[in-house]
Every structure is written in structure tokens, then in C-alpha cells.
Amino acid sequence: MATTKLKGNVVNLSGAELNVGAVAPVVKVVAQDLSEVEVGGQKGKAQIIVVVPSLDTPVCAAETRKFNEEAAKIENAEVTVVSMDLPFAMGRFCTTEGIENLTVASDFRNKAFSKFYGVLIADGPLAGVTCRAVFVVNASGVITYKEICPEITEEPNYEGALAAAKDATSTSCCGTCQ
């Protein structure tokens, strides 16, 4: 079972443990307008899937703002921030923060994304929400970068994720060769 930490205390994660080289499962999450959005799978462009516990925390808000700013700079890529927030709260956050270059989505209905991607916190004070993670999926639907942040209260490795996203925008390789 995968783990992360919350303020230094180990918390377990539940669900499938996906790694680099695996095909990213196609999962439906809920957009701020209550429509369904698909993440994962083969889309013909790179995907940056940013996972946060809640947009209503300073670290998650800062992370979302940073990816919103940087997303506009990467051609042939889409960014989706997945949390357990209700769509109404996500909409309010995006309006207040001026988030326009990425999609926010919620896994609140059935937690399918969290289970398929192995990012559901299984115990501790945040049990039932997502940990902090970043997945980059290439145009062929293969995971080329994965970071489960070792400490939930700290931001991810932006440089690593963004570099992987730029590499993943290439459509010349299916991602399975080395």
C-alpha cells in the first residue's frame, strides 16, 4: 500500500497504484458546471492531472494558480485539477482566483478517479479525500510522470512536472519505447 505524510504522520493511500509506463485509466469526474469530464486515456495531446485535497487550502490554491499560469505556456496539453471539492466551491474558487487556463474537476460522486489512480487517503484526519499528486499522460495515454508528494502540506515539484509535460506533448512516440 502506498503512503504519504500529513504534517509528518504517515497516512495510507488506497486504490490501484499506477506507475510510469502504465496506461492512464479513463475516468469521469465532475466539472464545476456539473457536466462530466474525462481524464486519462489517449487524447492525442498531453494531460497534466493535478490532484489536490481541496482548493480551499492555501497550498492547494497556490498550486492551482501556478499550474494555471504555466498551463498557458505549454502547447498541445491540457491541465485538469482534481479534488473532492463540490462543483459550486470549485466555481467560486475559479472566479475569485481568475483560473481560466485549466479545468477543475471533482471526484466527489463515486471517488472512481481516486481509486483508479491510487490517491485516496485511507486513514488519518483527511481520510476520504485525495492526497497531493501530479500525473503527466502523453498523447498515447501512457503515464510518463508521477509524483505522490511525500508531504501533503507541501507543493509538488513544478519543474519536474512541467518538463515532463513538455516532453509528453510530442506525438512522435507512443511512450512505450525507451
Image (spheres, grey):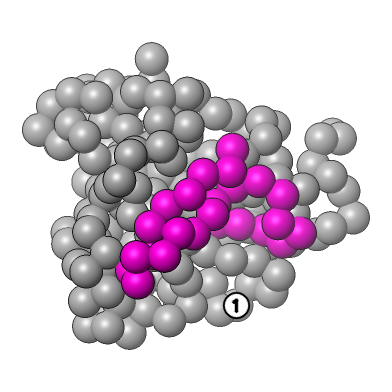
Q: Residue at x 74, y 54 (%)?
A: 139
Question: Could you tell whether 171 is left or right of 111 in the image?
Answer: right
Question: Could you tell whether 21 is left or right of 147 in the image?
Answer: right
Q: Along the line of sight, which residue is nearer the eye, 107 or 20? A: 107
Q: Where is residue 115, by image quadrant?
A: top left
**Hey, which residue is sitting farthest front in the picture?**
35
Q: Along the line of sight, which residue is nearer the eye, 128 or 165? A: 128
Q: Residue at x 20, y 67 (%)?
A: 89
Residue 150 drawn at (x, y percent): 34, 34
Q: Which residues are magenta?
A: 25-48
SS of the residue at dot 1?
Answer: loop
Q: Give the vertical position of 4 relative to 152 (above or below).
A: above
Question: Could you tell whether 154 is left or right of 74 in the image?
Answer: left
Query: Which residue is the site of mark 1?
Result: 73
Q: Amino acid at mark 1?
A: Lys
Q: Give the vertical position of 79 relative to 99 (above or below).
A: above
Q: Residue at x 28, y 47 (%)?
A: 108
Q: Is residue 97 magenta?
A: no
Residue 82 drawn at (x, y percent): 38, 53
Residue 53 drawn at (x, y percent): 25, 48
Q: Give the vertical position of 53 relative to 34 (above or below).
A: above
Whether residue 161 can be seen here: no
Report the quarter where the C terminus lies.
Answer: top right
Q: Residues within 10 Å of mark 1 (few under 14, many from 20)?
A: few
Report the quarter where the N terminus lies.
Answer: top left
**Hey, which residue is sitting farthest top in the picture?**
1
